[in-house]
Image: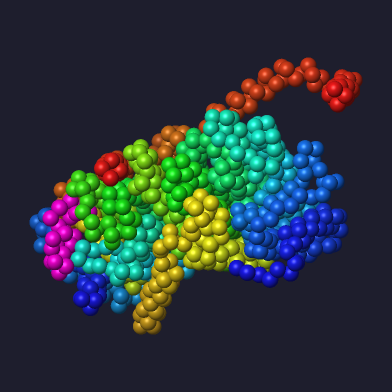
Amino acid sequence: MMLTMLLLLLVNLCVVPLLLVGVIRKVKARMQTRIGAPVLQPFYDVAKLLRKGETISETASWVFVQAPRINLAVALLVAVLVPWYGLTLPPGWAAASNLLLILYLLALGKFVSLLAAMDTGSAFGGLGASREATISLLVEPAVVMGLGALAVATRSLNLSEVFTQPIHPLVALLVGVALVITALAELSRMPVDDPTTHLELTMVHEAMILENSGRNLALVEYAVALRSCILLGLAAQALLHAWPALHAFPPPAQYGIGLAALGVTGIAVAVAEGVLVKLKWRRVPHFLAIAIVMSVMAALLAVAQR
Amino acid sequence: MSLPDLSGGYAPLWCGAALFAWGLVAILGCCARRAVSFLHPLLTGLGSLVLLYLALTGGTASFALPLPFFLGDAGLAFTIDPLSRWFLGIIGLIGCALAGFTPGYLAHLRTRLSLGFVWAALCVLLISMSGVVLAGNAISFLVCWELMALSSFVLVAADHEQQAIRKAALIYLGATRVGTAFLMGGFLVMHSLTGSWTFADWHVSGAVALLPAVLIFIGLATKAGCWPFHLWLPIAHPAAPAPVSAVMSGVMLKTAIYAMVRLFVLGDHLTHPALGPFILILGAISALWGVLFALLQHDLKRLLAYHSVENIGIILMGIGVALVARQYHLALLAQVGLAAALFHTLNHAVFKSLLFFGTGAIDAQTHQRDVEHLGGLIHRMPWTAAAFITGSAAICALPPFNGFASEWLLYSGFFGLATTGATVGLRLGALLLMGWLALVGALALACFVKAIGVVFLGLPRSKAAESAREAGRGMVAAQVLLAVLCAAFGIAVPALLRPLSAITAPLNAGAALAPVWTLPIPLLAALLVALVGGASLLMHTLATRQPTRRYITWECGFGTLGPRTQYSATSFAQPISRLFGSLYRYAVAIRVHGTRRRHFPDAIDAGATHEPYLETRVYRPLLRNLQRVAGMLLMRLQAGSIHQYLFYIALVLLLLLWVGCR
């Protein structure tokens, strides 16, 4: 049992994140009637980047060198701690899945990435960092209140306990949608940011990592994939818990359902990317306000029906 | 923690005597010019160690000085208990760091300041702050409070040959006067209600408590820098020398927090049901207001001053949680809220002093505090940069540093209110405040990324920044000490919760706090370090095959990048400033020169403006009108004629005689 859990955890850390990115890209390509790169392309990319040499700006300091490592370490740690349907943490670890600990660990990763972006003295880095900081301050309250609403509904701040208890479907649904919206913003996806334009001026995340190359970039890409997996995973699980019959399944099936839910969320992101246009930068707060309002509504429901 | 008691049970008395001697030698020694450079740092260090010793071993005791030390209506009385020991510990800790940092810092001001004078005032400030937290009755408290206000005023005005600094010092003095006036009013009401000056005898609750509570709160909030009484902070801090800002922001503001905890939270001295929600709301506003205005500042010290407003807000939110929870008989939450407030008090003292030290080191090396003229200092001042980044991570509440631990406690206090609160409104409010705190945290993160990015990273923006050197050994050592403490206090939380349990136990029938803290931070920190180490190892192995190349930053093929092509602090803050633009009347003005050639102007300059309209729209008209009214009334009394003044003196003497004979 223990061994299976460990195996599944390894799959979660090593296979699922990059696979998710591959699936999103493939679906998006199909929506644009392209064949698209193979689903495993992100794995090939990371492997290729790891083998390549690295060019660092002369202006950069140790911050630029260490930041991707810290960011990756944080992402790996959070990916272990964050609850996953069908995977249970060892009993002593439940407290480590505290929702605020997880959010602030993710903030630590963001802090170092923002600093790394500012480190090279490139205007693109500063621009990306400034915009990323702006987005994150709109996202953070929505996420804390949304997950807080789930926590109040289940009376525990530990996410691993939150997702083992039945939640009122409406609360779960509202929080789930809010989390999908915030994940789109955090992960620099359409309609907040376009990961595929050719113009750095219009980007947020790509502008931040413009100076990263080679193995350094491999770490960044892997960390981003892990973050996608974490944030979309949280959203998927919140949505999954709007389905009351969920808790009757045996554990292996649970894992499969969790994976399927993540896949569906990923496909939804890809579809959204296919049909939506990128918002003007000044309209982004309006889009994220939807998430904040939904979180507040979820909070109201959660405290009212406690 | 058990240290040997060498004094046969009289440790507090001996320590008191030592403190007195410290003050005396410091004041007398300031005349001895040659001795100042080593005598005063040594004295400060030793005195701070005495404070730390007292904090660790002091126990609980109270004593009054014998008869000649009598202040009219009550004696000089002092009480030491777990709460005052917690604050003594903070003073001692920062005092130690100060003893290391200050000599190096003051060296670059040697020609402008009278060093002996600054040192003496600094020592008096440290001693009077200890007096404030030890005072057993209102009169002793006020004496120490005034000594503290005056010595800090002297320190703010240290560089008084510059007019801006004189003005800042006078504004600070005015703010402390107003604060003390309110505080005295509150104490007088309390005396008339209870007939005693001793804090332990004060037990007032119900409707009569409202007036003294409000008066005392305003008096203390003015000192603490709580919104809307914070206006002196961003003016006084940039004017004072960096170590003084550090001790004022890190420690002196906290004496007001001490008094609030002492009078409002512990011991049922002064209770009113409106007090909790009131403090909670003011704290929430302070937190957001402080960080929002910090984001726009270009003067590093003013930026940090606004962050003090933010952190005081967070501390007040903790106190508010404690009061509200106590009102609804949620004993555990009251304890958690108070513990969060006190823990954050310690943490803020550590990381804010660290950040002010960093600013001071930069100021001493480059004579520049405007962030738009700095840059690239991480290559020239590596230790200062590393310490500043650590302090920033701590103030942004990032794990595993200390800020996270106390903010987590506050979050769990809110969460407790959100789950167990009696009414829907209370529960919803607590949950919304969690989101509010998250917003404040994200803004703080943006603000410190801006500060670090513009000051330490990138290319230097001025000659001064280009030719900077690392600060002296003492300055670096003090910063490293505080940076290590930031990490240590974040990891060794249970050890700090023990004294906090002793302080907060009365709120929760003597229960300990340890079960509240469930996070395995040491384990996670070790894992994090191991993972980063693993990643570094991998990178180094790969680097042996494909070496790393150093090259210029990509410039789109337009020629070399310079300092001016970098992102500036103004541009970094611009998107956020525009989001909250209506709050601070943010405007970007772009001027085009040489418009004759419409598409090829000679020059374009852009600048952002904002208006701190609490100051410009509320305080300025208020003060102006006050001055006008006072002018009309007092112009006749204060005519400047010596005869008239002699007449007043005679009148007062006669009045006193009449009162005395009656």
Asked whether the viewer can see residue A140, the reply is yes
**Which is nearer the eye, B337 or B312?**
B337
Counting from the top left corner in percent of width and height, residue B519 is at 41, 63
What segment carries the magenta color?
A238-264
Asked whether the viewer can see residue B248, the reply is no
Counting from the top left corner in percent of width and height, residue B552 is at 43, 66
Q: Residue at x 66, y 64 (%)?
A: B57
Looking at the image, residue B332 sits to the left or right of residue B650; the answer is left
Looking at the image, residue B202 sits to the left or right of residue B284; the answer is right
Q: Residue at x 80, y 38 (%)?
A: B72
Q: Residue at x 63, y 48 (%)?
A: B255
**Which is nearer the eye, A271 or A179?**
A179
Placement of the C terminus of chain A among the 4 image quadrants: top left
Residue A255 on the magenta segment: yes
Count of numbered badges drawn on the protein: 0
Counting from the top left corner in percent of width and height, residue A138 is at 35, 46
Scheme by which the image is coloured: rainbow
Counting from the top left corner in percent of width and height, residue B537 is at 39, 79
Residue B61 on the magenta segment: no
- Type of secondary structure dominating the magenta stretch: helix
Residue B620 appears in which quarter of the rendering? top right
Placement of the N terminus of chain A among the 4 image quadrants: bottom left
Q: Residue at x 31, y 49 (%)?
A: A152
B34, above or below B439, in the image: below
Looking at the image, residue A33 sits to the left or right of residue B410; the answer is left
**Which is nearer the eye, B100 or B229?**
B229
B522, above or below A195, in the image: below
Residue A234 appears in which quarter of the rendering? bottom left
